[in-house]
Image: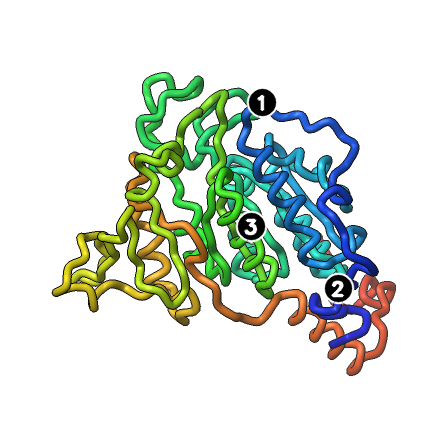
Amino acid sequence: MSEKFPSLKLVPKADAPQSAKEFKTDQEVRWCPGCGDYAILAAVQAFMPELGIRRENTVFVSGIGCSSRFPYYMNTYGVHSIHGRAPAIATGLASSRRDLSVWVVTGDGDALSIGGNHLIHALRRNVNLKILLFNNRIYGLTKGQYSPTSEVGKITKSTPMGSLDAPFNPLSLAIGAEATFVARTIDSDRQHLQSVLRAAAEHEGTALVEIYQNCNIFNDGAFEVLKEPGTRDEALIRLEHGQPIRFGADRARGVFRGADGELTVGVVTAENESAVLVHDAHAAGPATAFALSRIADADTLHHTPIGVLREVRRPVYDELMADQLDTAVAERGEGDLASLLAGGDTWTVD
């Protein structure tokens, strides 16, 4: 690999162990009291020292929204960029400065509405980015309008008679865009959140992590069924690679593949136990991961998978680009911008 464009594996390591405190800035954290963003911020600040990457070689890029204040609170380099354009800006940064660890922080409105096109192209290119998509199913910063993930019938300031739009499923969208790493976790489950972040950080290429995040002002309780002790065990399906997909307080329920190929949820018995689906996050084809992303009921959130749905290897965009640059230099020498601008491809317009 070119010395000009070193592999991400060569990102400089910290000279000495770092602490979570070193990743905290002196800025006042300005989110609404009780916002789920606090829990995510604390989890990320505590997790970053584990990577052993220098703070000056770490960059957080955000767009616009409540979540996009994140760079202010991370004592790393940061870019608070344009609405929806964080993946595009991060793509340029990661491709030209491959000595950096680049993270994108975005929300369901920022990433899936005005930024939808930028998101899917970053995913299909497989740039070395880690994208944290905070999903609270509402527009928080602009005070409670429905978002691309709001459920049908959602009554908000912008949909007083209920939303007519079918919501995006971010994980289905990512898998359809050929993402190589797709996962989901929850703001209040710190242990699970950090385990997913570790897996995302180790992945070479684009990693998309959807984080269910509570907006206690405009959409409070949207994910309570996944958090309350009385309901979460029956609602959450915790995925572990290589393990049968079973869940429930006594693991009495499981995921099966029906005769039509679709995934179903049912009670595990002695007769059908061997038919319980074993999770394979590294399967070459995306069909099963996509089917898992569709299990959850969009309205009640029952049977919601969390964890890593898909993690596969594919050539990384930045490395492919660096190889092309190396080849161009080897074959033609250093580029000459003046010659390019004054080249022979000209047109006369009458």
Q: Residue furthest bottom?
A: 331
Using the image, determine if residue 238 lies above or below residue 180. above
* Residue at 60% across, 54% down: 130
Please report whichever mark, 1 or 2, sits nearer to the chain's N-terminal start: 2
- Amino acid type, mark 3: Gln
Pointers 1 and 3 in contact (CB under 8 A)?
A: no
Q: Residue furthest left?
A: 271
- Cα distance between the residues tagged 1 and 2: 36 Å
Q: Position of residue 274 (x, y in %)?
A: 21, 68
21, 221: nearer the viewer: 21
- Amino acid type, mark 1: Pro
Q: Position of residue 263 (x, y in %)?
A: 24, 57
347, 181: nearer the viewer: 181
Q: Which residue is mark 1?
A: 33
| Element marked by disc 2 | loop
> Which circle, 1 or 2, is nearer the viewer?
1
- Amino acid type, mark 2: Val
* Residue at 47% across, 22% down: 218
Q: Which residue is mark 3?
A: 194
Asked whether, in this view, residue 43 is left or right of residue 347, the answer is left
> Which circle, 3 or 2, is nearer the viewer?
3
Using the image, determine if residue 213 lies above or below residue 272. above
Asked whether, in this view, residue 114 is left or right of residue 7, the answer is left
Residue 349 in which image quadrant: bottom right
Mark 3 is surrounded, within 10 Å at the Cα level, by few (under 14), some (14 to 19) or many (20 or more) other residues, namely: some
| Element marked by disc 1 | loop
Mark 2 is surrounded, within 10 Å at the Cα level, by few (under 14), some (14 to 19) or many (20 or more) other residues, namely: some
Q: Which residue is mark 2?
A: 11
* Residue at 53% across, 32% down: 36
Quadrant that contains the N terminus: bottom right
